[in-house]
Amino acid sequence: MQSLKEKQLKSRRLAAMVVASLVGVAVVAQTAPKVPAKPALVLGITVEGLSDTYLELLRGYFGANGFNRLINDGVVFTDVDYGPNIDATAATAMLVSGAPASISNISAATVYDKELRRAVSILNDASTLGNFTSETLSPKALAVSTLADELRVAEGGLNGVYSIAPDAGQAIILAGHAGSGAFWINDVNGNWSTSTAYKEVPNPINNRNFTSSLASRLDTLKWTPSIAPELYPDIPAYRKAYPFRHVFQRNNVDRYRAFKRSAPANREVTDLAADFISSMGLGKGKTTDMVSLAYNVAPYPYSKDADSRLETMDAYLRLDADLARLFATIDAAGPGMNRTLVVLAGVPAPPAGKRDEERFGVPHGVFSPRKAQSLLNVYLMALHGNGEWIAGYHNNQIFLNAALAKERDVDIVALRRESAEFLSRMAGVCRSFTLDDVLAGKAGNDAEAMRRNTVVGHSGDVFITITPGWEIEAADVNAGQNSRPMVSRLGTPMFPGFVLAPGVAHRVIGTPVDATVLAPTVARILRIRSPNGAESAPLRF
């Protein structure tokens, strides 16, 4: 048996060990790196047509708290790469889901319906109803989760997740499946609209639609230069002598569409976002809230002059002021910018609507999709007999009549190949590929990017590239482009992006970054799951 003295000695040793372990824990706790607090508010922004060329040109014209705040304090991505054949809606889906179109199912704002023989919104959903609109739209077509969804799930649905955009497609994609609300400007009545797919219509929406509607104010709104015309850089003298003036009169049936593409529409988005933040207490609770916005600085398609650089520069200057005002609202009425994560990225804009003037001698022509379809149908009838072999045209794609091919026992792969070979010899077509070429990674200069941006269920049978400088006949441009002419330009532009977050130091990433990387990177900063379709690893700052 142990003596009393031995028992006391053993107890003292045990006590010493406990004290030593506690001291060790305390030392580790004191020396462990401090983890930045989770942001209280996420501000997600897409800017259609954003160009680093204009950002560099106008930096000296910007204030300190808009674009320059992002450039000087945030992580700067000089080149965000979406790949070819993608529009703003599909690019937005890629940004927020981390998945390419082939996985997210969002290939463009509109897709071709072979039964209706026309373009329809990719987000069409007859099972829903519209609020303040007759449109029936939902995020059902989006096949994967988004950052908004993952943040909503992480917070148990107790947080607010909202999106505001001039365009319905971007608003719905930004809000995702689980968002609290998505809001956009209706093309017909100018109301801020939403879908019954979302549960909330907050007071700021009702207040605007009932007491300060766009319809009641649009006649009085005008867009003119915000500074003296002679102060804009790199503008020809004649444009400075005859500055722009755009109005949105009641007798113009396109006035809401024209307004949505203008710089004043960005101000409407900012006004509503500031109202959401200040009146709804976003970012001031115990959960992380999210507000996503879509802006536009693309060349103004309703300008009477083919050279719309003056409007474009003015849109940048106005958006810079809008960003500064939004950040000031977050500081004054929200959680503060030191508790806010800002993610801003440019997304593609439609091609220019006007070709250069005749006097410059730039080669040009007019491509008529309707004539192309007629000629191709005559050719296929000569090969396979009478019938309507062409089902339609949309977004530089020819849709063949698969049902007729099956009825006549014509191999659809061979029919595609015959069609592509014929179209490649047509004036105004510089390249053509079959759907099989695209899926096999044998199409275009960046075949893999083209493949991943293609959704088989929405795609045509033959893809054509219109000769650069040629105008696509306005009457044949799909309804998703508002029946305005487009001029073909080759090349796949890249776009700048920014991440401004607590605890993330400024740096510049000057190499191309795949757009699918941003969603998992933002998810890592928020310490939530990446969207379920995101395969890319997050960047580490």
Image (cartoon, helix red, strand yellow):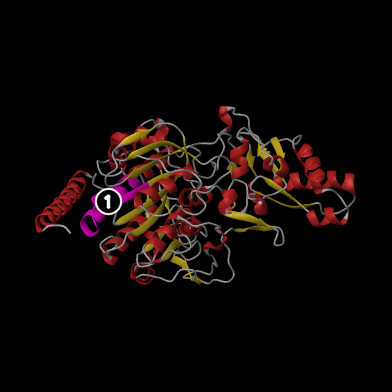
Residue ranking furthest to the front:
1
The image quadrant where one finds the C terminus is top left
Mark 1 Cα shell of 10 Å, populated few (<14), some (14-19), many (≥20)? many
The residue pinned by badge 1 equals 327
The residue located at (27%, 51%) in the rendering is: 327
Looking at the picture, how far across and down is residue 42, in whole percent?
34, 54
Q: Is residue 122 rendered magenta in the image?
A: no
- Is residue 338 in the magenta section? yes
Q: In the drawing, does residue 415 fall left or right of residue 370?
A: right
Which quarter of the figure has residue 233? top left
Residue in view at x 61 percent, y 38 percent: 448
Q: How many marks?
A: 1
Residues in magenta, as a range: 318-343
* Residue extending furthest toward the top: 361
Q: Is residue 471 visible?
A: yes
Residue 26 pos. (x, y %): 17, 49
Q: Amino acid at mark 1?
A: Phe
Query: Front-most of 135 and 71?
Result: 71
